[in-house]
Image (spheres, grey):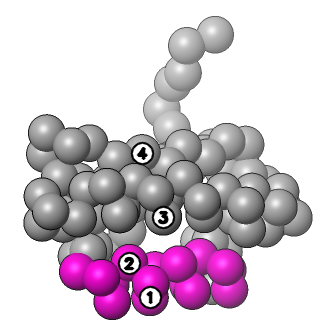
Amino acid sequence: MYVRVSRASYPAALHSEVSERLNSSSQTLIPALQRLPGCVSFFASADAASNTMVNVSVWDTLEHAEALTSLAEMTALFKEFVQIGVEFERPVINYEVMWQLP
């Protein structure tokens, strides 16, 4: 199993807009993610105190985790966020799970 972590930061003045866009992205991303093989779970989150957002997803294989990179809905959302001033850390890391809570 793999945990994929994507981090981004943005100016404090954008927090409301980032939060709204992140919330509304569920309309297109949830169906798209559900179509991808191997997606165990996905979390989209933002923090007003640090002006950062994090997407954390869990995948059954590394290949499945890496498929998220080419998901059209995710690519479109990435471009939207970049246009408003969000800066994404690169590369996105896929961590192999060593253990988990039963």
Q: Amino acid at mark 4?
A: Ser
Q: Nearest to the eye among marks 2 and 3: give it.
A: 3
How far is mark 2 from mark 4, CA to CA? 14 Å
The 10 Å Cα crowd at callout 2, few under 14, some 14 to 19, many 20 or more, is some
Check contact, mark 2 vs mark 3: CB within 8 A: yes
Rendered location of residue 70, percent (x, y): 63, 85
* Sequence-first disc among 4 and 3: 3
Q: Which residue is mark 1?
A: 79
Q: Which residues are magenta?
A: 71-85
Rendered location of residue 63, percent (x, y): 67, 69
How far is mark 4 from mark 1, CA to CA? 18 Å
How far is mark 2 from mark 3, CA to CA? 8 Å
* Sequence-first disc among 2 and 3: 3
The 10 Å Cα crowd at callout 3, few under 14, some 14 to 19, many 20 or more, is some
Rendered location of residue 40, percent (x, y): 73, 43
The 10 Å Cα crowd at callout 1, few under 14, some 14 to 19, many 20 or more, is few
Residue 63 is left or right of residue 85, and the answer is right
Residue located 66% across and 56% down the image: 26
Q: Nearest to the eye among marks 4 and 3: give it.
A: 3
Check contact, mark 2 vs mark 1: CB within 8 A: yes
Tell me the element at label 3: helix
Q: Which residue is mark 2?
A: 81
For residue 21, the mark is 3
Residue 21 is at least partly visible in this image: yes
Residue 78 is left or right of residue 29, and the answer is left
